[in-house]
Image (cartoon, grey):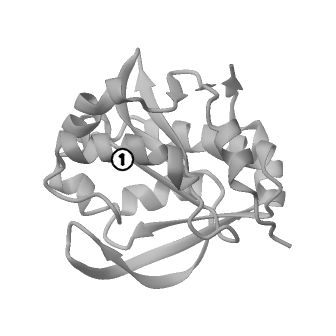
């Protein structure tokens, strides 16, 4: 049975840093606003994420970073060689259906960073929270995102229509879920550590 995790526990646990072979994942701060806005202000990213508007301004980034304190979301800025390259996290808007989300700056696509960052956050999720499932989705027109989810052990569970802010409409999304049991059997996929 899925359990509702109280928001105070979520807030306390979000301050850690996750490290992988090539990446460091940490909570974004106001000092990251310029980099976040630069990376996110690309229509190709916005069209594949549900909540990113396009164009994406520094004001949007400021609002996003400030709102993290109140939303209960578990969000990490992805860095490679101390340079921001994207975001990854868990959306807790539906406590019984926590959802993995991520995006990378276009210049960082196709290098395995998405899979590496997703695996680190998946490990964090199952190690820190008592949920049986983690959910995610990929636009049907985005096979690269689908590949990331499949490499992480997610299993396809159907297609739903979801609204995308940048598109101003709904579009089909392949829905996926990852069970704790499947994650546990795949856990040896690499090492990620927490500081």
Q: Quadrant of residue 166?
A: bottom left
x%, y% of residue 167? 20, 72
- Image-based side of 56 in relation to 189, left or right: left
Q: Quadrant of residue 133?
A: bottom right
Q: Considering only vertical position in the picture, is 51 above or below 61?
A: below
Q: Which residue is drawn at 24% across and 48% down?
A: 60
Front-most of residues 134 and 144: 134
Residue at disc 1, secondary structure: helix
Front-most of residues 71 and 57: 71
Q: Considering only vertical position in the picture, is 191 above or below 170?
A: above
x%, y% of residue 192? 67, 28
Query: On the image, numbered disc 1 is attached to which residue?
Result: 64
Front-most of residues 154 and 71: 71
Density class for disc 1 (Cα within 10 Å; few <14, some 14-19, many ≥20) is some
- Image-based side of 122 in relation to 83, left or right: right
Q: Which residue is drawn at 36% across and 47% down?
A: 64
Q: How many labels does the image show?
A: 1
Q: Residue at x 24, y 35 (%)?
A: 107
Point out the residue furthest to the left here: 55
Work out which quarter of the rendered image holds the C terminus and state it: top right
Q: Residue at x 35, y 29 (%)?
A: 30
Q: In which quarter of the image is residue 79?
A: top left
Work out which quarter of the rendered image holds the N terminus and state it: bottom right
x%, y% of residue 19? 60, 24
Front-most of residues 1 and 112: 1
């Amino acid at each position: 049975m899925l359990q509702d995790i109280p928001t105070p526990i979520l807030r306390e646990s979000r301050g850690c840093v996750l490290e992988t072979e090539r990446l460091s994942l940490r909570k974004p701060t106001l000092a990251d606003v310029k980099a976040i806005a630069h990376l996110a202000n690309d229509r190709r990213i916005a069209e594949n994420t549900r909540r990113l508007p396009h164009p994406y301004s520094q004001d949007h980034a400021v609002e996003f970073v400030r709102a993290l304190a109140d939303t209960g979301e578990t969000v990490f800025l992805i860095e490679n060689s101390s340079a921001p390259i994207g975001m990854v996290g868990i959306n807790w808007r539906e406590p019984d259906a926590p959802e993995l989300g991520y995006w990378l700056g276009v210049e960082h696509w196709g290098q395995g960073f998405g899979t590496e960052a997703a695996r680190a956050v998946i490990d964090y999720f199952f190690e820190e929270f008592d949920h049986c499932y983690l959910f995610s989705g990929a636009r049907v027109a985005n096979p690269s995102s689908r590949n990331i989810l499949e490499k992480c052990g997610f299993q396809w569970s159907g297609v739903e229509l979801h609204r995308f802010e940048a598109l101003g409409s709904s579009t089909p999304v392949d829905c996926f879920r990852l069970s704790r049991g499947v994650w546990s059997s795949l856990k040896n996929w690499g090492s990620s550590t927490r500081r």
